[in-house]
């Protein structure tokens, strides 16, 4: 598989549904940022690293918030576009002091976790998201992945 896959773009506003109520806000990436994902049509949940780049005059994020951080990413067909467009949403495993809409985001996709599934309940979905986060952190803990956190890709927006 062609990992690592680099993604890069300004964080877009979504419909605000799901994310924060499920305890799992997802930063939505613009379509153009998915150019490198185009070989990949397998929808589902991926893991990797991400970093947020505040504009020069921003004061709202802390130093912790701009580190290279672990992430899980959902790739799916967007119902809003009649399922003709892929959409990527990145949940970064970190408590941010504030939102970062419009800020530049970079992500390095390193592996696949699972396909999209249907859930019988909200609780079942929340449980599975927790499993995804654990799987991602366990995978990223392998020494072979550490180097990606220091990758030159993340050094500038
Ligand atoms: P939307 O539909 O606008 O994407 P969400 O409920 O998914 O709404 O929230 C996403 C927003 O939350 C992101 O664009 C970002 O500004 C903010 N956010 C705060 N913490 C995180 C996080 N840990 N991971 C991703 N986004 C976060
Ligand atoms: Mg979202």
Image (cartoon, rainbow, N blue to C red):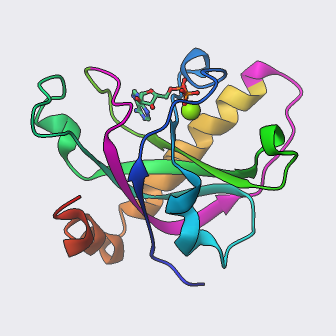
Residue 115 among those drawn in magenta: yes
User: In the picture provided, is 64 more to the left or to the right than 91?
Assistant: left
Q: Which residues are magenta?
A: 98-123
Q: Relative to the observer, which residue lies in front, 124 or 54?
A: 54
Pick whichever, 18 or 102, lies toward us: 102
Coordinates of residue 6 in the picture (x, y in percent): 43, 69
Residue 105 percent coordinates (x, y): 35, 49
Q: Is residue 90 magenta?
A: no
| Residue plotted at (60% across, 21% down) | 16
In this rendering, is residue 97 above or below 142? above
User: Horizontally, is 34 left or right of 94 in the view?
Assistant: right
Residue drawn where x is 56% and y is 70% of the image? 35
- Whether residue 36 sits left or right of residue 149 in the image: it is right
Q: Position of residue 156 (x, y in %)?
A: 18, 62
Q: Quadrant of residue 42?
A: bottom right
Considering every residue shown, the one lying at the far bottom of the view is 1
């Amino acid at each position: 598989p062609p990992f690592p896959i680099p993604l890069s773009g300004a964080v877009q506003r979504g419909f605000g549904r799901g994310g924060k109520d499920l305890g799992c806000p997802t930063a939505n990436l613009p379509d153009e940022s998915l150019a490198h994902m185009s070989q990949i049509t397998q929808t589902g949940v991926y893991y990797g690293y991400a970093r947020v780049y505040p504009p020069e005059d921003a004061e709202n994020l802390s130093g912790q918030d701009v580190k290279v951080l672990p992430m899980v990413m959902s790739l799916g067909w967007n119902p809003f576009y009649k399922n003709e467009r892929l959409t990527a949403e990145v949940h970064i495993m970190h408590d941010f002091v504030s939102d970062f809409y419009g800020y530049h985001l970079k992500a390095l996709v390193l592996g696949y976790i699972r396909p999209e599934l249907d859930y019988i309940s909200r609780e079942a979905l929340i449980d599975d998201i927790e499993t995804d986060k654990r799987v991602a952190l366990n995978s990223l803990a392998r020494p072979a992945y550490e180097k990606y956190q220091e990758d030159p890709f993340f050094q500038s927006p």
